[in-house]
Image: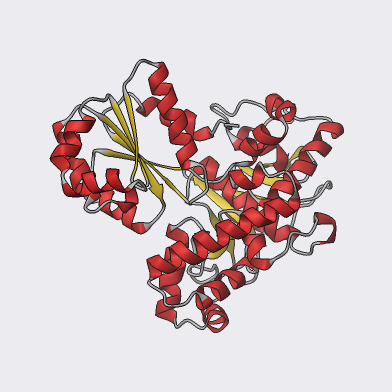
Amino acid sequence: MYINRQLEVDIKPFLAKKEVISIIGPRQAGKTTFIENLAKQFKNNDKTVKFITFEKRADLDLFNNNIEDFKKVILQYDVVFIDEFQYSKDGGQKLKYLYDTTKTKFIISGSSSLDLTFQTGKYMVGRLLEFSLMPFSFREFLSARDREIFNILPDKTGWNLFEFEIKNSFGQEINDRLIKLFEEYIIFGGYPAVVLSESNQEKEKVLESIYSKYLLKDIKDLLRLATDSELERLGKFLAGQVGSIIKYQELSNASGLNYKELKKHLNILEKTYIISLASPFFTNKKTELVKNPKVYFKDLGLRDYSLTDFRDFSVRNDIGSMIENYGYNLLVGIFGGNIKYWRTKAKAEVDFVVEKEQAAYPIEIKYSSKRIVGKSLFSFIEKFNPPVAVVLTKDYIGEEIVNKTKIKFIPIIYLA
């Protein structure tokens, strides 16, 4: 069963352009399925299409060893898809030659290794459009799990979080269905094979495969590690620290890595879409934190597997950090990668800050059915006078004015 992806909408305006499209992301996020569906769309529009995978040795050898013969083959097609492009040798240089000497449209994909990004981007400046395909968002999850709910979600075209209207709400029955599905999504994450698994036991088995074959194998190879023991310890410690400010000495002690090796590991984990690091927002170095980032996981199912913890929400003590982690990923999807947090040396803290149109908008996560506004949010409002502040709740919805700042209480389940 093919699940439509948001990336289809984002990529559509560029399909008719000459630039090469590069689709990167973690293994098992659905890249091959996605580009196979794109290929069908081109064929339906009477385009001649060639689908190549560099996991097939013959295709890879032809590209690597005789680019002129490879060119003769692909000249017969309007569009050429190349999957697992990271396996190529001098791929970026060869792709530039093909781009410059043919009229063929190229769409490449591959795992999010640094090698793929570097070898293509280095040669393809001005010729390459890069897109990321991540595991299912909550909206895509709903498309797979509950089409009735998915179909009544509001259209997000031209949508603005800070202009959310209370009238866009559901009754308690729909809220309850959304909450149940949302909490399942938070626990097991959005990898397509996990979402489409029938039982929790099957979901855990699939996550085990992704964890061992991707996190412990591919990243181990990228880091050129003799053993994955330090990497596994680091991953497990980070999984227990989501939403927390990184303390490098603690991480070093927990993983057994020195500072230089620790920074290298963190960089690889971030570049390969395992973790994200959120920087602090500050305007005064004397009173606000300015350096250490917070850590979040790109997929919470992978995070829970590393902790071997798939317990129900009703018995967990880490719900707050899990919802905050989801909130971070959600906001990155809405606003792009520059989502920050705010914390003063006096311990006032706001979960997230979005800088937009010369204003700083605070966003808090309060997974509750009640109105909750922390003192820290009031401190931020008093200091920065934002036009709007947002509190993402479980299912409480409302608005109020504080010092000319409109505070919007929005159920996080509505932002799929």
Between residue 164 and residue 346, name the one nearer to us.
Answer: 164
Q: Is residue 365 left or right of residue 234?
A: right
Q: Is residue 289 left or right of residue 55?
A: right
| Colour theme | secondary structure
Residue 382: tell me if it is visible.
Answer: no
Quarter assignment of residue 118: bottom left
Image coordinates for residue 209, horizontal then vertical, percent:
58, 58
Identify the residue at horizontal 73%, vertical 43% (top origin): 198
Identify the residue at horizontal 46%, vertical 41% (top origin): 31
Quarter assignment of residue 71: top left
Q: Quadrant of the N terminus?
A: top right
List the single residue furthest toward the front: 58
Between residue 76 and residue 244, name the one nearer to us.
Answer: 76
Q: Quadrant of the C terminus?
A: top right
Q: Is residue 295 left or right of residue 118?
A: right
Image coordinates for residue 106, horizontal then vertical, percent:
29, 34
Image coordinates for residue 199, horizontal then vertical, percent:
75, 48
